[in-house]
Amino acid sequence: MIATNVIQGGAVGSVLEQALSASGGLLRLTPTWVPRSFLHPGRRLKLHPDDLYAYGAERGGIDERWFASTTEAANQGRVWHEGLSFVSFGGQQFTLKDAVAAAGPRLIGQAMWNEYQRWPVYSKFFDNMGPIPHHMHQKQEHARLTGQEGKPESYYFSPQYNNVDNNFCYTFMGLEPGTTKAQLRQCLENWSKGDNGILDLSRAYRLKRGSGWLIPPGVLHAPGSLCTYEPQWGSDVFGMFQSLVEGREVPWSLCVKDVPEDKKHDLDYIIEQLDWEKNVDTHFKEHTYLEPIVAAQGPGWVDKWIVYGRIDGKQLFSAKELTLEPGARCTIRDPGASGWITVQGKGSLGKLNLQTPAMIRFGAETEDEVFITFEAAQAGVEVVNTGSEPLVGLRYFGPDVHANVPNVGDYKK
C-alpha cells in the first residue's frame, strides 16, 4: 500500500532538494514488499502475520523485502510500483527511481550516472519456509534477447534475521562435476512427469549464518531456507529448471519466462543459457564461498566486507556489515553511494534516526532503511549507537565503487 500523497515527474526535484538539505544527503526509504506466487513465506521479515497476503491470496505471500531498489519486480499481475523503493520526506513520497532520474550525479556519482543512467543494482531480504526451485539467472547475452539485463547475485546470511533454520537449511548449487548436457536435457523432457530429478545431478551445501556466496549468471542454484541478504544486479530475469518442489508444481512458464518466443520449447537453447563450465566446476565452493573480512575498525566498532569479489573480472556490487557496540560512534566515508538496512539496535545515521523494528504493518513507515547518496558518502556520515545492544547495519554498493575489493577466498589469508 502506497500513500496517496505520491509525487511524480517534475515535482520530484524540489522536494528531493529539500530532503537532501534537511538530512545532509541521506534519504529515508520505506519498506518495499514483494510477493512470489510460487513460494511459501518464511515469516522472518518482521511483517505482521495478518499482512503476509496483503496483495491478495492469488498473488502469493510476501517473502521478499527489497532495499534501495529502482528495479521493478517481474511478477505477473504486479502493481505499478512493485519492487520500487520510495523516499519519504515531509509527509510526501516519491520513488528512488524518480529521484535518481532527477539528480543522478548527486545521488549515485557522475561516473555511474554516465555509464548506466540509473542505480543499476539492488538488494533484498529473501525469506522462505523451504527451498525454492533449482534455477538460474540469464547471462547478458541471453537476457538481451528479451530486452533485459543479465543478473549475477550474492548471498549473506545475517544472524539477526535467522533465529530459526526453517525447513531446509541447504542450497543446491551448480551441477555435479561430470554431469552431461544430455542428462540435463532428460530432466527438461521429464518436466510434466512430476519430479524431473534435476537435484540428482546437483550437490547441496549447508548454509552457515554469517557467511555468503557469490553466484555468477548462468549458474543453477536452489536457495535453502535461511533468510538471505542478496545484493545483486538490477534485473529480475530467471529460469526455473526444477518441475516439483516440496510437492508443489513449478509451471513450464517459469522455466521460459525470459526466453524468446521462438525458443520456449527449444531444450538445447534453454540449456545453452547456462554457463556450463561454472556449473560443473570441481572447485565450486572454493570459487564462490564468502566469509567476512575486516575492512576497518576502531574503538567499539568494526566494518566488515560481507560481499566481495568479481564476476567475470568485473566489480559489479559489494557489501559491508558495520557493527557498533553500545555508546560507540564512528564516521563511515565511502567512495560511492549505498543502500543501508539496520538489522539490530538503534542509533543514528547522520541526521536520521535508526531503529530496528520488531513488527511492521504493510504500508507503515520504519526507521531502519536509508539511501546514502554519493555526496554524503564522500563527505562522511557519523553513525552512533544510542541503544543498549549492538547497532548493526548492512550496506551495499554499485559497480566499480571501490578501488580494490577482496577476492573470493581472501578470508582464508
Image (cartoon, rainbow, N blue to C red):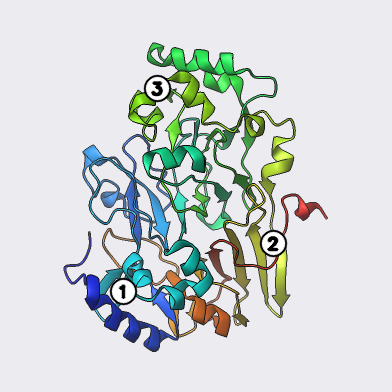
Q: Name the residue tied to disc 3.
A: 247
Dot 3 and dot 1 residues touching (CB under 8 Å): no
Residue at which label 1 appears: 88
Which callout, 3 or 1, points at the residue further toward the start of the chain? 1
Q: Determine if residue 341 is in view.
A: no
**Residue occupied by mark 2:** 405
- Which one is closest to the eye, mark 2 or mark 1? 2
Q: Earlier in the sequence, mark 2 or mark 1?
A: 1
Q: Alpha-carbon distance for marks 3 and 1?
A: 42 Å
Cα–Cα gap, marks 3 and 2: 42 Å
Residue 405, picture quadrant: bottom right
* Contact between labelled residues 1 and 2, with CB atoms less than 8 Å apart: no
Q: Secondary structure at mark 2?
A: loop
The kind of residue tagged 1 is: Ser
Q: Identify which residue, 45 or 3, lies in the foreground.
A: 3
Label 1 secondary element: strand
At 35% from the left and 63% from the top, the residue drawn is 85
Q: Quadrant of the N terminus?
A: bottom left
The foreground one among 201 and 53 is 201
Residue in view at x 64 percent, y 67 percent: 402
Asked whether, in this view, residue 89 is left or right of residue 399, the answer is: left
Mark toward the viewer: 3 or 2: 2
In the rendered view of the protein, which quadrant contains the C terminus?
bottom right
Against 383, residue 398 (above or below) is above
| Residue type indicated by callout 2 | Val
Amino acid marked by disc 3: Gly
Q: Residue furthest right?
A: 413
As helix, strand or loop, the secondary structure at mark 3 comes to loop
